Image (cartoon, grey):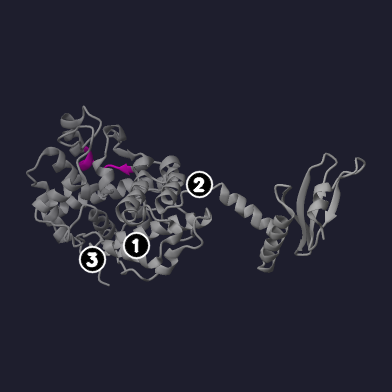
Amino acid sequence: MLTDAQCRNAICPNDKKRERFSDAGGLYLEVSPAGSKRWFLKYRAAGVEKRLALGSYPDVGLTAARKAREAAKLQKSEGRDPVQARKIEKLKATIPDADTFKVAALEWFDKNQTRWSSHYATREKRNLEKDLFPYFAARRISEIEAIELLAAIRKVEERGALDVAHRVLTTAGFVWRYAVATARTGRDITADLKGALTPHHGKHFAAITDPAKLGALIRVIREYQGGPIVRTALQLAPMLFQRPGELRGMAWAELDLDAALWTIPAMRMKRKLEGKLNGSPHVVPLPTQAVDLLRQLHPITGRGALVFHGERSHDRPISDNTLRAALLTLGYGPTVQSVHGFRATARTILAEVLDFDPLVIEAQLAHAVKDANGRAYNRTQYMKHRVTMMQGWADYLDKLARGADVIQFKAA
């Protein structure tokens, strides 16, 4: 056992690299020829000899070194490697002191938003700012209980937004897992809430799939007395059956009316950020009826960039509510026919009534499906078939509008 006097007087001969003075339990003082003195603890972990630095003498005295030895032995008895535990403590020291929910959440958001689409980033930020920050912004994330998080998310349920409630829980889960990874908390409490929320069953967009009823709708659309911009967009919605946002944002630069093609840039498609940045554009063949409608509209909006610009600003498209309101004016509310529902209308009738290949239909819908052999299709592979299908679909809508005999669904 060492004494304080022995520690003070310990020296290393010049002909040695170091001199060690043992205490007990693996603790020793190492002295260099230059006179520096450092405490080390020698121990074995998984059959391998290791040593743990405990500080320099006299800053760490003999008593303090022995206490550090006992603490390290306690770690070892708990199954923790003292050296590894020291490394973890150093990593924790590099993490900002602020460990509130808001700091952790914004740090997670900033590190991930560059990989997200702008729509997804906006939704995640809204989940945080509207439904989580009001309750937990200034709280230490390690002190928040699962029951508190559940109470906050049930506030979302109470306003009838069951789908949003599930998304908020998902967002919270991302934040908690990030907090665990950055040593701000010990566990992800969102796992405790699995099954605690009211189940949400998504609703399909309302869509007419009966040919006779569709014919009645096409007739009233063509009799719409609103302005030419909305009237044209309303007629193209069932004819081209693209997503409402893609239709509303149509630009004249995307159109080649002589070639009867509409090329929607990848950035405007409903895709993940990687698909938006590196994916191919979606090409929509235009039937002659669509080309005629667009040529008629060109003198009105052709000087600007957008085909369907808004009334207040020619730099922004008509709003997402414009076509919904127009349908409602015609007597077709959101529970009967939605703008997005024209996609389901076309998909159903093209397959069940007009016998078009489902793969060709899915390609036209810009759905990423696979063929029977499991291979992801090339959207351009079906261009010839899609040209034929789109013209056939527009002609069929004309027949329905005239009240001609229509082909009914095949009997099951």
User: Under tag 3, what secondary structure?
Assistant: loop
Q: Mark 3 points at which residue?
A: 409
Task: Identify the mark nearer the N-term, 1 or 3.
Answer: 1
Magenta span? 284-291
* Image position of 315 (left or right of 70): left
Q: Residue at the spot x=14%, y=60% of the render? A: 213
Q: Name the residue under label 2.
A: 96
Q: What residue type is labelled 1?
A: His
| Image: 172 above or below 279 | below
Q: How far apart are marks 1 and 3 (CA)?
A: 38 Å
- Badge 3, how many Cα within 10 Å: few under 14, some, many 20+? some
Q: Distance between the residues labelled 2 and 1?
A: 30 Å
- Badge 2, how many Cα within 10 Å: few under 14, some, many 20+? few
Quarter that holds the C terminus: bottom left
Q: What residue type is labelled 2?
A: Pro
In this view, the mark in front (2 or 1)? 2
Query: Are the residues at dot 2 and dot 3 in contact (C-beta closer than 8 Å)?
Result: no
User: What number of labels is visible?
Assistant: 3
Q: Can residue 352 be seen in this view?
A: no
User: Under tag 1, what secondary structure?
Assistant: helix
In this view, the mark in front (1 or 3)? 1
Quarter of the figure with residue 251? top left
Q: Mark 1 points at which residue?
A: 166
x, y percentage for residue 114?
44, 42
x, y percentage for residue 343?
27, 54
Q: Residue at the spot x=78%, y=53% of the render? A: 4
User: Under tag 2, what secondary structure?
Assistant: loop
Task: Identify the mark nearer the N-term, 2 or 1.
Answer: 2
**Residue closer to the observer: 100 or 242:** 100
In this view, the residue farthest toward the top is 303
Q: What residue type is labelled 3?
A: Phe
